[in-house]
Amino acid sequence: MERSVLVLNQNYEPFAICSARRAIVLLYLHKVQLIEKYDVVVHSVSSSMPLPSVVRINRYIRKPFRQITLNRKNVLRRDRHICQYCGKNSKPMTVDHIIPKSYGGNDSWDNLVTACLACNNKKADRTPEEANMKLIRKPVKPGYLFYLQSLIRNPHPSWKPYLFMN
C-alpha cells in the first residue's frame, strides 16, 4: 500500500498527490470518489476494495497557486530540453536571454529560453531579429500543471489523461 494516488479537484483539475492509505480513508469517509484504480484489491476484516489510483474530491477546494522558481533547471524543463531556435535536443544546453542584458533584458520567464550551444553562440549579444533567428515557441511562465508534472517523474498510465501527458 505504498503507492501514490492522484487527487483531482471537483472540476477534475489535478489537485495533489497523496498516499493510498490516505485515499482509502477519504473514500471511507465519502470525501472523494473513486475515478481510476490499480489492479490490486485491499482487504480489511469486513470488506475488500480496489486500491485507488485517481480520486476526485466531492466539493471544489480553492488552492493558492505556488510560484515556480525561475532557475536554469526549470527553464530547461519548461522547454523540454529543446533548443528554441533550431529545435534540436543536443547537449550541452544553455539558457539564453532573448533580449540580451546589455539591451536591458531581464531574468524573467518570458525573456529566457533553452538554446543549444551553437545557436547561443550564433545569436551572441544580439536580439533574435538582429541575428536573423526565429523562436520556435514564445516563452511563457509555467502554471500549476507544470509544477505538478515536474513533481511526478514516471506517472502511472491512469494518471496521464488528467495531467495532460498523453
Image (cartoon, rainbow, N blue to C red):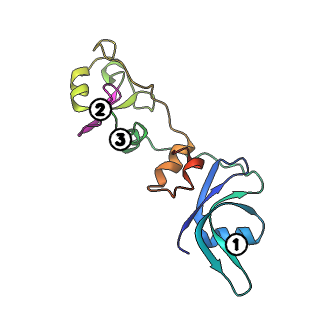
**Of discs 3 and 2, which sits in the foreground?**
2
Q: Residue furthest bottom?
A: 45
Pointer 1 residue: 25
Q: In the rendered structure, which amino acid carries the disc numbered 3? A: Arg
x, y (%) of residue 50?
Answer: 65, 71
Q: Residues within 10 Å of mark 1 (few under 14, many from 20)?
A: few
x, y (%) of residue 39?
Answer: 58, 68
Residue located at (72% from left, 47% from top): 11
Pointer 2 residue: 88
**Of discs 1 and 2, which sits in the foreground?**
2
**Is 139 included in the stretch rendered in magenta?**
no
Pointer 3 residue: 72
Q: In the rendered structure, which amino acid carries the disc numbered 1? A: Val
| Residues at marks 1 and 2, CA–CA distance in whole angstroms | 47 Å
Q: Residues within 10 Å of mark 2 (few under 14, many from 20)?
A: some
Magenta-tinted stretch: 83-97
Front position in the image: 41 or 121? 41
Front position in the image: 54 or 116? 54
| Residues at marks 3 and 1, CA–CA distance in whole angstroms | 39 Å
The answer to whether any part of residue 22 appears in the image is: yes
| Residues at marks 3 and 2, CA–CA distance in whole angstroms | 18 Å
For label 2, the SS is loop
